[in-house]
Amino acid sequence: MASIHLRHLEEYLQQLDGFNKPKILLEQYATSAHIASHMLYCAQSQFNDIEGHTVADLGCGCGILSLGAQMLGACHVIGFEIDSDALEIQSRNCSEIELFVEAVQCDVLQYLPGRFEKYFDTVVMNPPFGTKHNAGTDMKFLEIATKLASNSVYSLHKTSTRNYVLQKAAQYGAKGKVIAELRYDLPKVYKFHKKASVDVHVDFIRFELNQ
């Protein structure tokens, strides 16, 4: 069971600040409090993968998944993020809600796994979907995640890539299961966006590592 109710978790996460000036090259889109809370609550209430466990958040951005995992009772959470501006917001979010989450500034794809190989019980992430200038980045994140986690990885991926994602996961030694199909509302934050918002169909997937 989760240590706090889903509604309360979402309310806490709604207080957090997002990106001030999102960077297109990093595909920065804030994970909404609604999606983040449901991801984490599912991981804890259905699979007991958060409370009392070590948790990594890859590409942690402003810290919504990291802080949510901490709220659900993770024993040690580390967020990994390349962007110093995002980490400043993450630090401010920690102060505002009086929770501490360790953060490491690094290029996830270059720095990890290293000494963190199989260090974490659980990895949570909302990786770049690998569009525009970042083709294949989502799969690189997934490969790294499977090297860091000893038990499970929770991630979001475009539904249109489902079969490919599950096949690649199997190559990495992970068995993927689609937990839910979501509509990810991407707001108009970049100049090239022509619509106020776009709904992207996204899979919420749990990857179980082969023991």
Image (tube, grey):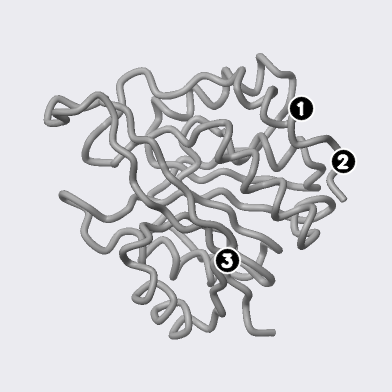
Under tag 2, what secondary structure? loop
Residue at 49% from the left image edge and 56% from the top image edge = 181
Contact between labelled residues 2 and 3, with CB atoms less than 8 Å apart: no
| Residue 86, image quadrant | top left
Q: Earlier in the sequence, mark 3 or mark 2?
A: 2
Residue bearing the label numbered 1: 8
Contact between labelled residues 1 and 2, with CB atoms less than 8 Å apart: no
Q: Earlier in the sequence, mark 3 or mark 1?
A: 1
| Residue 148, image quadrant | bottom right
Amino acid carrying label 2: it is: Ser
Q: Is residue 26 visible?
A: yes
Residue 179 relative to residue 53: left or right = left
Q: Is residue 115 visible?
A: no
Residue bearing the label numbered 2: 3
Under tag 3, what secondary structure? helix
Residue 158: image location, x then y, percent: 36, 57
Q: Earlier in the sequence, mark 2 or mark 1?
A: 2
Amino acid carrying label 3: it is: Leu
| Residue 109, image quadrant | bottom left
Numbered label attached to residue 148: 3
| Circle 3 or circle 1, nearest the eye | 1
Alpha carbon of mark 2 to alpha carbon of mark 1: how far?
Answer: 10 Å
Amino acid carrying label 1: it is: His
Alpha carbon of mark 3 to alpha carbon of mark 1: how far?
Answer: 30 Å
